[in-house]
Amino acid sequence: MEPCSKIQVKQPSGFFKLGNTYCLSIQGEVYICIGPDWPYNFCLGSIVFGANLFFLLIMAPQVDILMQYIGLFIYMTSMISYIITALKNPGIIFNHWEIELEETSNNKNYCKECSVVIEKDSEHCYECQVCIRGYDHHCPLSGKCIGSGNLIPFYIFLVSIFCGIFYVFIWIFLVAASRRA
Ligand SMILES: [Zn+2]
Ligand SMILES: [Zn+2]
């Protein structure tokens, strides 16, 4: 964003609350953002972490090395992509501090809920109370919105979950076959 000469702009740094989300910003750039549904992050995060532990301690020792690597890749991917989805800024649009409100309120592309100039594909989320760039949906299980900033890790997470479930069926089949042999 190019600062306009007549508007004083401060770059926010550190932790602050934006709408119902908690942000960590460094020199005006929001890097980490935790949503209003953050308790779900602990629930789903624990389940994903538990699945990783279960794989490492129970499942992996009973299959051959190739299956161990495939399983490790799937379960680690699910955990890492979930952490990134839950923490990464989904694309919150915000004004740098102290932008003149009159300037923005005359603009028809202006969100009255959170006082920002909206962009194409952006949408206001009433749960998070912020406008999200490339809004996809509000995902309670991720604790917040899915937008252009965290859409790719979110899809990677979904795919890895399906692969993880599929892997369990293959694993049951392989273990049952090896016990019969
Ligand atoms: Zn808004
Ligand atoms: Zn939201």
Image (tube, grey):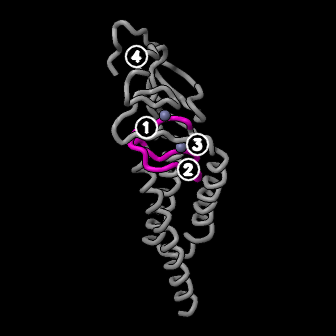
The answer to whether the beta carbon of the residue marked 1 is less than 8 Å from any atom of ligand 2 is no
Q: Mark 4 sits on what residue?
A: 103
The disc labelled 1 sits on which kind of residue?
A: Gly
Rendered position, 70 above or below 117: below
| Alpha carbon distance from label 1 to label 3 | 15 Å
| Mark 1 neighbour class, 10 Å CA radius: few under 14, some 14 to 19, many 20 or more | many
- Along the line of sight, which residue is nearer the eye, 139 or 50? 139
Marks 1 and 3: which is nearer the front?
A: 3
Label 3–label 2 contact, CB within 8 A: no
- N-terminal-most mark, 2 or 4: 4
Q: Mark 1 sits on what residue?
A: 91
What segment carries the magenta color?
A: 129-149
Q: Mark 3 sits on what residue?
A: 127
| Mark 3 neighbour class, 10 Å CA radius: few under 14, some 14 to 19, many 20 or more | some
- N-terminal-most mark, 4 or 3: 4
- N-terminal-most mark, 1 or 4: 1
Marks 2 and 4: which is nearer the front?
A: 4
| Alpha carbon distance from label 1 to label 4 | 23 Å
| Mark 2 neighbour class, 10 Å CA radius: few under 14, some 14 to 19, many 20 or more | many
The answer to whether the beta carbon of the residue marked 3 is less than 8 Å from any atom of ligand 2 is yes
Question: Was residue 41 drawn as part of the magenta stretch in this picture?
Answer: no
